[in-house]
Image: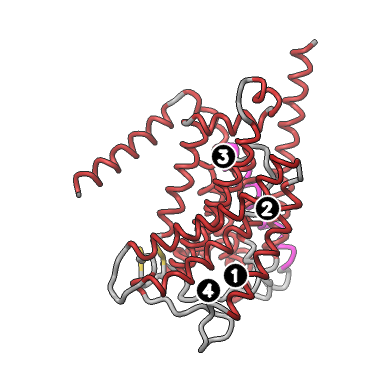
Amino acid sequence: MKRKMLAFFASFLNTTATFFRKKETKDVIWETIRTLAMLLFSLLCAVVVIALASRDDPGAVKVFLTAPFEDGYTVSRILTESIPLMFTGSAVCLMSRAGQFNMFVEGGFFVGAFVSAVLAPELCTGTSSFLVPVLCILAGTVAAAALGYIPAKLKSGLGIDEFVSSLMMNYIVLWVVLYLLNNVWGDPEVTNATKYLEDFAKLPFLSRDNELSSGFIMAVAVAVLCALFLFKTKWGYEIRLTGNNREFASYSGIRTDRVVVYSQLIGSGLAGFGGGVYLLGNYYRFTWKTLPNYGFDGFVIAIMARNSPILVPFASLFLAYLRVGAQQMSLYTNVQHEVIYIIQGIIIILFGAKFLMDMSVKKKRGKEMTV
């Protein structure tokens, strides 16, 4: 068994190394450098905003920048905060690469967490087994993918805009889950909560003292696997070609309707997988009464990562660092943590402007080639 595990990890590392050695990935490396430069510029803008908001408290900027690294617990909070962002960011990247603006990442994350929390107490038998959380997370993944199939099929079959249908699906899922939570699968002894999750029904901790779950490793692995899937498989090539030019992809023999469906199916499933991992790694009950907004945050991450899954961990850690810094700043200074939303808006404007400039350059080059 140990030899098989070692062989698997060796194969995984070798495949990843091969991916980065290819000439094709030089563009990805260059994009990484450009993205990091833009993130640093965004951080500078954040410092300026905080400096303007804290004229009566000049130490706010220092707290914002350094407090997230003051001890092991705050560092683990950055890593923990980045877990859902990596999952939802990877899911959005996959769907966006296919040209699909699907908002069900939010609902998928919510459903995956709920299904995992409901099944875990029922499956555990009082003994520790890694199969319990694995099966629960997989069930949440399947549930999210099944629901995500609805807007995907509506788009491919009837031409209904996936943005509208998936956005509506989020709130349908929200109210159905809340009904089930209050009337069917809730804990009768606790209001608006599922049954208590024992440690053996949860994912193991990487650091119990700092409350960091193994979900962080899983989130990074998912981002890497998504990159390999997009750039090293036939299905990934079909997704990228369909997103770049659906008409050309169709003429090339690609069944673009099928690509539209399975790209959204995989993205929704990834979101549900992330919801299950995050809940079973960091919570003891499902108590969410509203959508947690991690799916919407996934679009921010995808914008920062320029729809490249390999950049998702960097973008997620950066945004998590900003959020933990803002939380610490609100504890020690008179600047409220809501300032982070101003910073997020600046980041979206910066990266959105860069995206529009790149699109403009591509169109100009295309016109020059046709002349």
Q: Which amino acid lies under the numbered mark 1 shown in the image of this protein? A: Gln
Task: Please tell me in which quadrant of the rendered image residue 105 appears.
Answer: bottom right
* Position of 57 relative to 266 (above/below): below
Crowd tier of the residue under label 2, counting other residues whose Cα lies within 10 Å: few below 14, some 14–19, many 20 or above:
many
Magenta-span inclusion, residue 113: no
For marks 3 and 2, the one nearer the N-term is 2
Q: Is residue 21 visible?
A: yes
Residues tagged 2 and 4 counted as in contact (Cβ below 8 A): no
Residue 176 locus on image (x, y percent): 65, 69
Which residue occupies 76% across, 52% down?
164
Name the foreground residue: 223 vs 349.
223
Magenta-drawn segment: 33-53
Q: Using the numbered discs, state the Cα–Cα distance from disc 3 to disc 4 in whole angstroms.
A: 31 Å
| Image side of residue 167 versus residue 240, left or right | right
Q: Secondary structure at mark 4?
A: loop
Magenta-span inclusion, residue 43: yes
**Where does label 3 land, which residue?**
308
Residues tagged 3 and 2 counted as in contact (Cβ below 8 A): no
Crowd tier of the residue under label 4, counting other residues whose Cα lies within 10 Å: few below 14, some 14–19, many 20 or above:
many
Residues tagged 3 and 4 counted as in contact (Cβ below 8 A): no
Q: Using the numbered discs, state the Cα–Cα distance from disc 1 to disc 4 in whole angstroms.
A: 23 Å
Q: Secondary structure at mark 2?
A: loop
**Where does label 2 land, which residue?**
103
For marks 2 and 4, the one nearer the N-term is 2
Q: Using the numbered discs, state the Cα–Cα distance from disc 1 to disc 2 in whole angstroms.
A: 27 Å
Q: Secondary structure at mark 1?
A: helix
Which residue appears farthest toward the top when viewing the image?
371
Indicate the quadrant containing the C terminus: top left, top right, bottom left or bottom right: top right
